[in-house]
Amino acid sequence: MSNPSFAIIIPARYASSRYPGKPLVRLTGATGEERSLIRRSWDCAMAVEGASGVWVATDDERIADEVESFGGQVVKTSSDCVNGTERCAEAIGRLGPVADVIVNLQGDAPLSPAGMIPQLVEQLSRDSDAVMATPVVRASRTVYEHLTKDQAEGRVGGTTAVVDGRGRALYFSKRVLPHLTPEAAAMEFPPVHLHLGLYAYRPAALQRYAAERPCALELLEGLEQLRFLDIGLPVTVLSLDPLDWDAIELNNPGDKPVIERILKERGIV
């Protein structure tokens, strides 16, 4: 598939077990302006060139009202969706064939670089056997220390990925993988791949995914992408050079000041 079209879906739910109401959390940017997390995720999506459309998929009226207040598009989904991938599948079922590739921009990743999405779509296009593509970046030492601190203190932080020599995903975990020696952990960029909250799917793969029951590892880790691996569907990984900033996701209340600091450092309103 050459130059496939793509649309962006931002799945958002209110009832997060770790951080209820997270999409409506206000984050202060460089000018002192507060914007909700879902607004910042929308801003990220709107900065992407070439998207055929952008929608927020949610079952919550509070989130829908917030999106509509800043002129965003909403597609209503049911409360039965157990994760963002199922929500994307239902959204596309309602919207119809809007694009060749559907991009899931997770609503808790406002620091994702906009230029990454066309690269991700291209990665999926190059790997014709893969049904989904997702990006990783080499963790900086500060990101690695943030992840290991969360782990040591019993908090669920970011997600790491283990990738084979062909660029296919072997596993994803909320533990920090792989285990590192002290020497490796002290490197400026330790050999740990941080998974970023983006997925590009072929629409047929979304429907196949939604037709399957959640697998045991998906339920244990709380990571939706593991269902693809469990049913034997190949996931291609876009490996990116380290970013110039720490792409922290808003997973816990303690992540808020870190994200706000990065917004200010990067001059994001």
Image: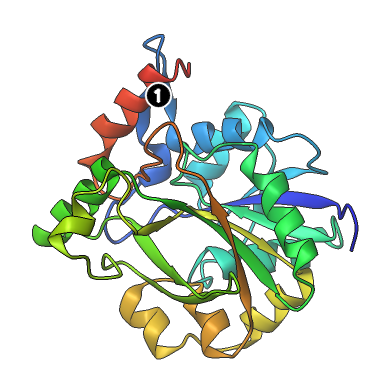
Task: Choose top left, top right, bottom left or bottom right for residue 11.
Answer: bottom right
Residue depicted at 67% across the width and 53% down the height: 120
Q: Is residue 192 above or below residue 242?
A: below
Q: Is residue 107 left or right of residue 263?
A: right
Q: How many marks?
A: 1
| Location of residue 78 by image quarter | bottom right
Residue pushed farthest left?
A: 153
In the image, is 214 to the left or to the right of 71?
left
**Near-viewer residue (43 or 65):** 43
Residue found 48% across the figure and 43% down from its top: 62
- Name the spot of residue 60 as percent of width and height, x first: 50, 52
Q: Which quadrant of the figure contains the N terminus?
A: bottom right
Query: Splitting the image into 4 quarters, where does residue 32 fall?
Result: top left
Residue 145: tell me if it is visible: yes
- Residue tagged by mark 1? 263
* Residue nearest the observer in this picture, 109 or 10: 109
Residue 165 at x, y = what percent?
A: 54, 74
Q: For the residue carrying disc 1, how many other residues have a C-alpha within 10 Å: few (<14), some (14-19), or many (20+)? A: many
Q: Work out whether residue 4 or residue 256 is closer to the camera in this orientation and state it.
A: 4
Residue 252 is situated, as x and y percent measured from the top left of the image, at 25, 48
Check disc 1 and give the amino acid type: Leu
The percent coordinates of residue 162 (x first, y second) are 42, 71
Q: Is residue 154 visible?
A: no
Q: Which residue does the image show at 44% across and 31% down from the upper left?
A: 244
Q: Residue furthest top?
A: 31
Question: Mark 1 falls on what kind of element?
Answer: helix
